[in-house]
Amino acid sequence: MIEFGTGGWRAVIGDLFTKENIRRVACAVARRMQREGVADRGMCIGYDRRFLSRESAIWFSEVMAGEGVKLYFVNLAAPTPQLMFTTRHMNLPYGAEVTASHNPAIYNGIKLFTAGGRDASKDVTDQIGAEANALSAEEIRAIPFDEARRQGIITFIDPRDAYLDSIMSQIDMKAIRARRPRIELDPMYGVSLTGLMTILYTARCDVDVINDRHDAFFGGHLPAPNPDTLRDLQGIVTDHHADIGIATDGDADRLGIIDEKGNYVPANEVLVLLYHYLLRYKGWRGPAVRNIATTHLLDRVAADYGQKCIEVPVGFKHISAAMDQHNALIGGESSGGLTVRGHISGKDGLYAASLLVEMICVTGKPLSALVQEIYDEYGEMHMAEYDWALTEETKQDIQRRILTEKQLPDFGVPVRSVSYLDGCKVCVEGGWIIVRFSGTEPRVRVFAEMETIRQADGLVKIMADFAGLPFTPASR
């Protein structure tokens, strides 16, 4: 069955991610547009560097053409945030990107966007998924790609310049030119290279690049910027005495950061750093939005400036909606995605990377010193993150005991509150812990945040033992 999660539809290539299912999703989208009376306005589609991404975008486009929907086709592999920007910039009712983001190389998928370049809401994707599952192959009409181009139904576009110009117009390029930082870049074989190099070279940065070739298997690694996948970047930052190391995931909507000492900077700290920078150094004001599994250090920074921090379920669509509702300044998540007011409504690794470079240039402080500045003012919080592959039996047991019957273990510290907004989150004295099912993979995740990583690991162990999950502390 085609099933959309928090990050679109993702499935194993050749299992559920097949030409037939791609065509079914396209047909469901086209018919929704017909019912809404927006088929003549059209939609845009792009693709990343994964196996079958371009072919999948073509199969999708052929069905849209067969249904009479105008299709704007980005004919070079492009970041997901560029497609979100293009959907908004061209005032289109829908857009799409063929990608499975940071999932393993055996996956591919489709992310859908609605008017304004927003992640499609659950109501929209649920309806599209249900309609796609009900379609038979015989019901689907298609026009061959080249023929649809000749008829003018499919048009090639190159929106890259408009997207990059928009980012550079929001970044203090003059401050970066004045400092001329040295930057090590790891696109993780994904689609950020051209865009980030354009921005950084325009700002006169000195840039070295690793892992830049086209490799649909991502060098045999997960295309997710985390401590395990960025060891090469850590080494090259210290070897070259760089100011910062920047990595982006497969479709460039998330990033990972290495400081000038070669230390991995957790995504939570990146989010807090940028919010603090916008408030203190740029003088901007506004609330912050974070998902339920993101650092509460953000709340402390917000409170210090008379702002509030809004908590939402996991899924960037919830962050975008809350940012609009509260006119928030920044929104982000612990997995490395964030955006800032005035930019697109989705996460953007290229924009976030550019803003971080601006931050170290404007402040004149190394990244490690800026992190210490946060700790000195607001105290330390450290997050432990673990996940497990699920059998159906284990999933049902966790669902029944923790989410339905609301059973909880004894954490050994006073419980302040319990939330079931998304999974089960328990706020305890000094921190919090959450257990929730992944919206993109068949896994269960347990995150905890406390003053020390040892305390956070301790909370995770208690929850893992209670849920019947094998626990081995990560080597630190």
Image (spheres, rainbow, N blue to C red):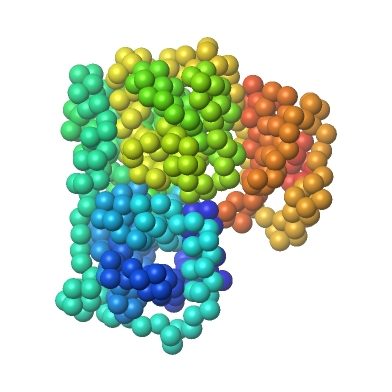
Of residues 336 and 167, the one nearer the viewer is 167
Is 176 above or below relative to 57? above
Q: Residue furthest bottom?
A: 138
Of residues 298 and 241, the one nearer the viewer is 298
Q: How many marks?
A: 0
- Which image quadrant: the C terminus? top right
Q: Position of residue 118 (x, y in %)?
A: 40, 52
Of residues 315 and 258, the one nearer the viewer is 315
**Is any part of residue 231 visible from this angle?**
no
Of residues 232 and 115, the one nearer the viewer is 115
Q: Position of residue 406 (x, y in %)?
A: 79, 46
Q: Position of residue 445 (x, y in %)?
A: 64, 45
User: Residue at the spot x=57%, y=53% of the render?
Assistant: 439
User: Residue at the spot x=20%, y=67% of the render?
Assistant: 155
Give left or right: position of 43 versus 169.
Answer: right
- Which image quadrant: the N terminus? bottom right
**Is any part of residue 8 visible from this angle?**
yes
Q: Residue furthest top?
A: 376
User: Residue at the spot x=55%, y=35% of the render?
Assistant: 310
The picture quadrant where one finds residue 395 is bottom right
Is 279 above or below relative to 8? above
Q: Position of residue 223 (x, y in %)?
A: 44, 47
Is 387 above or below relative to 184? below
Is 106 above or below relative to 348? below
